[in-house]
Amino acid sequence: MITTSARRIAAVLAACLLAVLPAAAGAASAAAPVPATRPGDGGQGRTTFGVQPSAAKKPDARPHFSYGATPGAVVKDHIAVHNYGKKPLTLRVYAGDAFTTADGGFDLFAANHKPTDVGSWVKLGKNVLSVPGRSHVIVPFTLTVPQKVTPGDHTGGIVASLSAVRTDKKGSKVAVDQRVGARIYLRVAGELKPRLTVEGLHTAYHGTANPFGTGSATVTYTVRNTGNVRLAARQAVRVRDLFGGGTKVAAPRDIPELLPGAAVKITASATGVLPAMRDTTTVTVDPRPVRGDIKHRVLPRVTRVEDFWALPWALLALLLVAAGALTLLLVRRRRRRGAGTSAPEPRPAAARSKQAVGLAAILLTAGAVVAGAPADARAAESGGLAVSPARGSDAQPITLSSAAPCPAKTANVIARVTGAGFPREGQIVVGNAPLATYPKVPGGGLSIPLTYTMRDYASTAGFTALRGTYTFTVSCLKGAFDLTSLRDFTGSLRFTAKDAYRDGTRVAVKAPDAKAPGQSEQPVPPTVSGGGTGAETGSAAGAGAGAGAPSVPANGSAAPAGAPAATEAAAQDSDTSLVAWSVTGFAAALLALLMGAAHWVRGRRARAAEPEPGD
């Protein structure tokens, strides 16, 4: 029994030893600067040689060579070549240019590629090395920058190569070239131009056999570095149908590094694409400095938009079959009627005219009823919304002021802007916030300072040029999770230049009630007239979080404590006349509808009373 236990213990210890040995070999591999594998090791993964930046006497901790120089400068440095095996190695060392791989990675050209950039500027002290086992050799080199060289980034590297011949499973001789390299980043002084472009945007729609289902789409495009600086990039792809509905798009990977002049092709897949005839793809690329580089002042966002055909072939085929079946049914029915009866005599003109007039009256008055009905019988009641200042720039804060208070049951408010460049459903400019967040203007309306500027909202939506009329809509909601709008307030402004707008909406508001005895004095919020062309002095930032004191208008004047009585009377007369016209129009349309229906019924009865042919 003791012997059996000893055997078990020995077996466990042997298994642990076998598990630890590969881990130790892997740790040694990770510690090597830039290791390579010997071709004849049979895939055991043991490192044999590597390279790393070095000082004249010993290697240092630099991850790569990085220099800043002027045209004509000469840089002297060293590279260490390591042999981690027991046997000596004969290695070839050379300099080469760098390129970006198809998947966005970094690589150096092989030795048979003639360098034209940094690789041609480097001169090594030795090109063939004999490195003893478990040792290293330090090789000096000189980098000479040409006098006529373009400013910006130039990238290359120094490669150590081990060539060997091995035999594959079929017995064939295969030449294998194992390479490791150290990167060289050189930035030549001069004007830096960080710039990316999006080219070749194409979207292919893939339909579905379900007539009422959604399909998928494949988006392909190329991101190219047209500047002279290495850049990283963050990407976003959006696919929207004709009605503004979104889809689910697999987010494309970020680009970690794109060399000047290089390009990488990106493919993204979208699901849930509604075949609405003409859909839209928007690609946004945000350039970013690569890790460890300086932050550039201007990194302009790149946006490309393309419309593509998304035809509902299955639905069209179904409609075609249905139309053919209906046509066949009508033809057969007409033939049966024609075969069973003789040609009918013409109906009296009076009966036909009565029926036509009655039907026309019904259709016309039904439209009049819909158009003349009170607004809150069809949708949320609309009101005016002042845009202040009425003139300004795209970098100027804007305040929205409603002409009247929200209905009594309102708990939250939300605001959107629509217009050229923004999504069809609108860009949210004020999030879903409690009603008490915002101060009130005279008359009980809301004063809502926007958190950001129009330029910021345009940048968020993926474009830069503001043009035409933009409409703001403030909706009074029942609650944070109930998006039913009890009332909407709308206002607009118009951009007449690239960065300037005018014609901000102006509305008249009711004067505040007289202050009751003992009532505390309230701060005067901004006027809703929208006047003034200067910059607002009140802070608009943080308004969405319920920030404190309300801002003042652009001209610095506060709203008067009491508006003229004529303004209030005019507003009341306008409301009264609007209600009167609505009630009168609704009553007239309803009466016309009843009369048309009666006329149509009489025509039907007259037609039924006509004698049958042959009586």
Image (cartoon, rainbow, N blue to C red):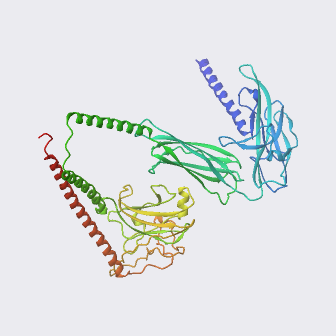
Q: Nearer the viewer, residue 595 or 403?
A: 595
Residue at the location (21% across, 57% down)? 596
Q: Is residue 60 above or below residue 487?
A: above
Q: Is residue 59 visible?
A: no
Residue 277 visible from this viewpoint: yes
- Residue at point 80%, 33% (across, down): 162
Camera-side residue: 43 or 162?
A: 162
Of residues 325 and 531, the one nearer the viewer is 325
Q: How far across and down, in percent of the image, does residue 303 sit?
A: 58, 53
| Left or right of 37 on screen, residue 449 | left
Q: x, y (%) of residue 103?
A: 65, 41
Report which quarter residue 514 is drawn in.
bottom left
Which part of the image, by quadrant, shows the C terminus? top left
| Residue 63 versus residue 522 in the image, above or below | above
Quarter of the view holding residue 134:
top right
Residue that sits furthest to the left in the current view: 615
* Residue 502 in the image, given as x and y percentages of width and height: 51, 70
Q: Residue at x 38, y 39 (%)?
A: 319
In the picture, measured across the screen, residue 291 lies left or right of residue 143, that is: left
Tally of numbered tags = 0
